[in-house]
Image (spheres, rainbow, N blue to C red):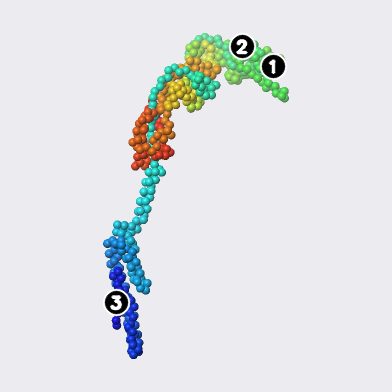
Amino acid sequence: MDERKSPKKTDGIRRHTDVRPRASSAKTSGASSVKSSVAAATHASLRQTRSKTAHKIEHKRQALQEEEYAEHEIPQNTFLERLGSSVIASSGKKVIHERSFRNIVMPRQFSFLKHKYAAALLGGLGATVLMAISLSTVFARVTIMLKPTVDSAKIDGTQISFDASASDVAVSSHTVPAEFLSFDGSASEDFDATGNDYVNQKASGRVKIYNTFGTTPQALVANTRFVTDSGIIFRLTKSVVIPGAKKAPDGSLTAESIEADLIADKAGEESNVSGQVKLHIPGFKGTPKYEGFYGVAISGFSGGSVGQGKVVTHDDVVKAQEAVSKKVFDDLRQSMAQKIPANFTLIDSLSEIRIVSMNTPKEKTHADRFTVQVNATARVFVFRSADVFKLLNELVLKGDTAKSIVESSADLHYQIKSANYDRKIADVNIAGSVKTKAVIVPEELKRLVAGKKEGSLIDAMKQRRDIATFRVAFFPPWMFSAPTNPNHISIVVEDTAADAK
């Protein structure tokens, strides 16, 4: 049986074609028919065997070629040709073999991309690059921390007025608004009598005299007698007028009263009465006024004595008055310090404490111990320190808005010239010294440094006479120039209080 050779393709693989039998004569048609059947069966078996053999060869060759492509680069001019010839066979559209597309199109330099984590690595690298670009543009910042320059200024006898009626600082009249406050206080204390003498003393006490008789006031002269239910007589030490009772619309009367001092008619301990005591006026006996006017001594009467015993001396009274007065003064000062608002300033020289009343025993009063009570009132001017510095800014700096006073650095002394506590105005002289600092305008400074490189920025800051020291911080750290957008520049003016002291 004659076979035709199959043509070779450019990839070196021989492909077979159908083998057709030669034509026979009519004489041998019967034999040829039998032979053709045998030949057809033989050819079919041969084709099947060849197909299997070719498939095995092709599979082995494909494995060798894949190994070859992994070690050597494919020439660029043969890439498309090899790709086309390696996928589909030339006859019958039967797939003979196929190569790995990755091995063909991916050069050895990029073989790392075959790794299963290659995409994640490339994504992370891209995100890092994008973040670096964002930090260097959108999030770029520069912070300048600085301290303004500080100078000294003296104040020599500047006169100002604190006025409780003023509502704001008046530069022309040197007036500062103030608050006028008043406080009431009292103190009492017991002391030992140190004297020893013969005494002939009458008991005494304080009473309230009531008028329940009528709406007309009633006058009582000095030495008017009052008598207790037990018959002890006391007399008024001075004249008084008892106010008239108040009459209600229904005709009823409400008693009115007045306080007065009574002293026993006779000396001796017999006039000493403890507890609350009610007294009537004997001169009104037999008339409706006897029940309409009466006195009540809440603490009774005491001090009556005759004979040798302890007495209160002049020195006892003076020392007791000084001690109790000091106590009430201290109590008032403490009360003022606690009750004055925190934003106000209190100066001792702008305060006044007056004694309203003082209850002390008379000299040679017979007693082992005695009591002194002092009632006092404090009046004081208080002011806001900010108002004083507002005035000094105008008087000392003379309208220079490029500077301001450092309030915490002020060393001021107030000397009172005059204080009228009734008119609620006080004139004082201020002397001392203050520190002044330069006023930094952040927006102006931002415009100055915007877009400047680090060296130019530092030079510009050094030329500013209003800046004592400064520090510059860039973000991100690899940036060495200020953003062009002023909103990305931060100016931090640090406190100069410590430097100004």
How crowded is the residue under tag 2: few (<14 C-alpha within 10 Å), some, or many (20+)?
Answer: few
Q: Nearer the viewer, mark 2 or mark 1?
A: 1
Label 1, label 3: how many angstroms apart (C-alpha)?
Answer: 161 Å
Dot label at residue 216: 1
Q: List the residue tagged with mark 2.
A: 238
- Image coords of residue 465 (percent x, y): 37, 28
Q: What is the number of the mark on residue 379? A: none
SS assignment at label 1: loop
Mark 1 crowdedness (10 Å alpha carbons): few <14, some 14-19, many ≥20: few
Q: Is residue 314 left or right of residue 72?
A: right
Residue 25: x and y in percent read 33, 88
Q: As rendered, which of 203 and 293 lies closer to the eye?
A: 293
Disc 2 is placed on an element classified as loop
**In 3D space, how far apart are the residues under numbered discs 3 and 2 (Cα atoms)?**
164 Å
Judging by the rendered image, the residue that carries numbered circle 3 is 5
Q: Quadrant of the C terminus?
A: top left
Q: Which is nearer the N-term, disc 1 or disc 3? A: 3
Q: Quadrant of residue 158?
A: top left
Residue type of the residue flagged with mark 1: Thr
Q: Relative to 219, does residue 167 appear above or below in the rendering?
A: below
Q: Nearer the viewer, residue 2 or 139?
A: 2
Earlier residue among tags 3 and 2: 3
